[in-house]
Amino acid sequence: MTLSRLELARLVDHTLLKPEATPADVAALVAEGAELGVYSVCVSPSLIPASVPEGLLIATVCGFPSGKHTSAVKAVEAAESVVKGAHEVDMVIDVASALAGDFDAVEADVAAVRAATRGALLKVIIESAALTDDAIVGACKAAVAAGADFVKTSTGFHPAGGASVHAVALMRKTVGPDIGVKASGGIRTAEAALAMVEAGASRLGLSGTRAVLDGLDGAAAPEASGGDSY
């Protein structure tokens, strides 16, 4: 696969979700994101910036990183974030529900947030590294049935790891061409980023965006996985 630096940048949610992040850190993230030409910046709900440069969107997270919040709490958090200016919300499912095969619960959880997001784009984090293939398929189908715009591999905080080419390919096969697939977690190199896109990712969550873009020249596309924050 061949992508230009700008083409790859336009697939990136430039991400800062560290607990110790400050408003100054977010301001620096926004400035760097605008310089690099990324699609969006992704920050914690309490750090959503008041404004960003034209052409740059704001993404945030919901029920993050455990997914163990009640659906009602996730819905309130998502709604508040949209009011504050978030264009996109990345919610975390209750992973235990997916592992137990209770996909009705997964669908209801996603539907509650979908109803609260007021037209904002909704990505659903399934924590793919912690799931069996059957659970990945079931969780993706439940998310789509509830109105998700994207399914997403990982928070980047789970000890099981982050994105893998296998999971991305399975998720793409499950949701088809009309739903987005976001790969996140442990994508640190241009080779890994291209591998995820080749497998079917239409968005990438990266915290080390500049290093990935700088490594684009001559990059191949081997399988990669990992578990760092995005």
Image: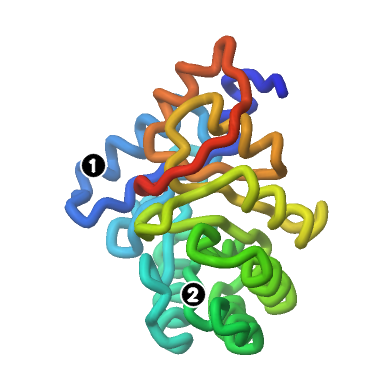
Task: Check if mark 2's residue and mark 1's residue have beta carbons within 8 Å.
Answer: no
Q: Secondary structure at mark 1?
A: helix
Disc 1 crowd, CA 10 A, few/some/many (<14, 14-19, 20+) = few
Which of the pair 76/218 is nearer the observer?
Answer: 218
Q: Residue at x 58, y 78 (%)?
A: 110
Q: Residue at x 57, y 57 (%)?
A: 152
Q: Label 2 neighbourhood size at 10 Å, few (<14), some (14-19), many (20+)?
A: many
Q: Nearer the viewer, mark 2 or mark 1?
A: 2
Residue assigned mark 1: 25
State the image coordinates of residue 25 (x, y, percent, origin top left): 23, 42
**Quarter residue 143 falls in:** bottom right
The N terminus appears in which quarter of the rendering? Answer: top right
Measured Cα–Cα span from mark 2 to mark 1:
30 Å
Task: Give above or below for 82 relative to 24.
Answer: below
Residue for badge 2: 95
**Secondary element type, mark 2:** helix
Q: Position of residue 107 (x, y in %)?
A: 64, 82
Q: How is the image coloured?
A: rainbow
Q: Would residue 126 be seen by someone viewing this image from the given angle?
A: yes
Residue 10 x/y as whole percent: 59, 34
Front residue of 177 and 116: 177
Residue drawn 45% across the image and 89% down it: 72
